[in-house]
Image: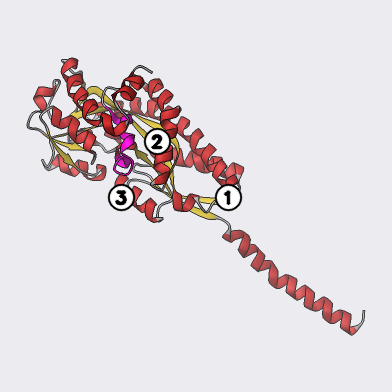
């Protein structure tokens, strides 16, 4: 080999060696971190769903994404997390439709009290035309809702036994910061107070609020049986929600990545719905062991009459009474 050839060979070898770390660094840089906010702990469906989604995505796109799942409400309540996602600091989360209704008022159709008969009824609606319309409206507000989830029914939680709506008159009740929820409890003569879910335990224990409503799973998840031991099985609202991604994050993905995340979220929603059913049973066993008591509502017509006034007031917002009646009979 000539001296000139040797110099060319050595130079090309050194160039390749120097380039190798750069290429490795470039490959590593392609891993995108997805910060996910979860309200509850690792043992709850709200966090388990994201572990499931992360596994599904890793199987399809190895090394492409790293899910940074932050549990226990460390990043704030639903509205704070939603705001953070719009700003880009949180890339994904779950939310009840109630918490997002400030941006998309039409979502309140899923929150109408005593509208849905059972989980299957809700599922038919959110996987049909109504669900597609709501997803499109959410996208205009920078929420990419990949799937709908069912948190279970909301029930009344109180410090003393309450079985009829008349007994709520004058009580201070914590509500989701939503006009619909405020209207519902006002119809029964209660005084609604908007408080983030992460602050409800303290509000109830200090007397800021006397009652609230929540799903059975979250009732145990937040240990609320310690401060509101009575759960009246009103099942007045089917608490639906969404699995969503921040639009600013979503827009930077390839079509392949979007498709994989969408499918993982949809499969995750089905997984979540199954987990909720199982978790509700465990949650009520946990609550009962700690002094929680389940009671049945009386005078269901009176409960439904209050709900009907909400249907009338919000009909124009959610698409008209004809649409509500159609969903009720779907």
In the image, residue 99 sits, relative to residue 294, either above or below, namely below
Q: Which mark is residue 80?
A: 3
Tell me if residue 101 is in the magenta stretch.
Answer: yes
Instruction: Decide if residue 67 is on the left or right side of residue 7.
Output: left
Secondary structure of residue under mark 3: helix
Q: Quadrant of residue 220?
A: top left
| Mark 3 Cα shell of 10 Å, populated few (<14), some (14-19), many (≥20) | few
- Between label 2 and label 3, give the one nearer the viewer: 2
- Between label 1 and label 3, give the one nearer the viewer: 1
Q: Which mark is residue 134?
A: 2
Q: Between marks 2 and 1, how big is the CA–CA gap?
A: 24 Å
Residue picked out by circle 1:
254
Instruction: For residue 16, say whether it is visible.
Output: yes
- Magenta range: 99-112
Residue located at (30% from left, 41% from top): 99
In the image, residue 189 sits, relative to residue 71, either above or below, namely above
Q: Are marks 2 and 1 in contact (CB under 8 Å)?
A: no
Q: Are marks 1 and 3 in contact (CB under 8 Å)?
A: no
Residue located at (35% from left, 20% from top): 326
Q: Quadrant of residue 313?
A: top left
Spot occupied by residue 6 in the image (x, y as percentages of width and height): 86, 80
For this orientation, the residue located farthest to the bottom is 3
Residue located at (52% from left, 40% from top): 262
* Label 1 or label 3, whichever comes before in sequence order: 3
Q: Between marks 1 and 3, how big is the CA–CA gap?
A: 28 Å
């Amino acid at each position: 080999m000539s001296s000139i050839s040797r110099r060319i060979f050595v130079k090309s070898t050194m160039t390749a060696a120097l380039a190798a770390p750069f290429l490795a660094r470039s490959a590593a840089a392609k891993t995108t971190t997805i910060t996910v906010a979860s309200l509850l702990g690792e043992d709850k469906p709200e966090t388990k769903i994201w572990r499931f989604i992360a596994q599904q995505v890793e199987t399809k796109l190895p090394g492409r994404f790293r899910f940074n799942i932050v549990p226990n409400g460390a990043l704030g309540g639903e509205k704070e997390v939603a705001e953070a996602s719009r700003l880009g600091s949180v890339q994904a989360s779950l939310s009840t439709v109630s918490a997002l209704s400030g941006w998309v008022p039409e979502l309140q159709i899923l929150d109408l009290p005593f509208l849905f008969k059972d989980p299957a009824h809700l599922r038919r609606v959110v996987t049909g035309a109504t669900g597609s319309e709501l997803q499109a409206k959410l996208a205009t507000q920078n929420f990419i809702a990949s799937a709908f989830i069912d948190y279970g029914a909301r029930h009344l939680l109180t410090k003393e036994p309450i079985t009829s709506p008349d007994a709520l008159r004058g009580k201070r009740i914590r509500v989701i910061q939503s006009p619909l929820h405020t209207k519902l409890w006002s119809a029964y003569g209660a005084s609604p107070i908007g408080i983030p879910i992460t602050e409800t335990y303290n509000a109830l224990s200090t007397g800021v609020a006397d009652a609230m409503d929540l799903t059975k799973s979250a009732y145990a998840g937040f240990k609320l049986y310690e401060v509101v031991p009575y759960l009246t099985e009103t099942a007045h609202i089917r608490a639906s929600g969404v699995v969503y991604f921040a639009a600013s994050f979503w827009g930077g993905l390839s079509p392949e990545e979007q498709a994989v995340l969408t499918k993982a979220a949809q499969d995750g929603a089905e997984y979540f719905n199954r987990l909720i059913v199982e978790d509700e049973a465990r949650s009520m066993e946990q609550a009962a062991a700690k002094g929680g008591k389940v009671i049945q509502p009386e005078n269901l017509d009176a409960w439904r009459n209050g709900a009907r006034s909400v249907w009338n007031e919000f009909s124009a917002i959610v698409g008209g009474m004809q649409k509500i009646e159609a969903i009720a009979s779907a």
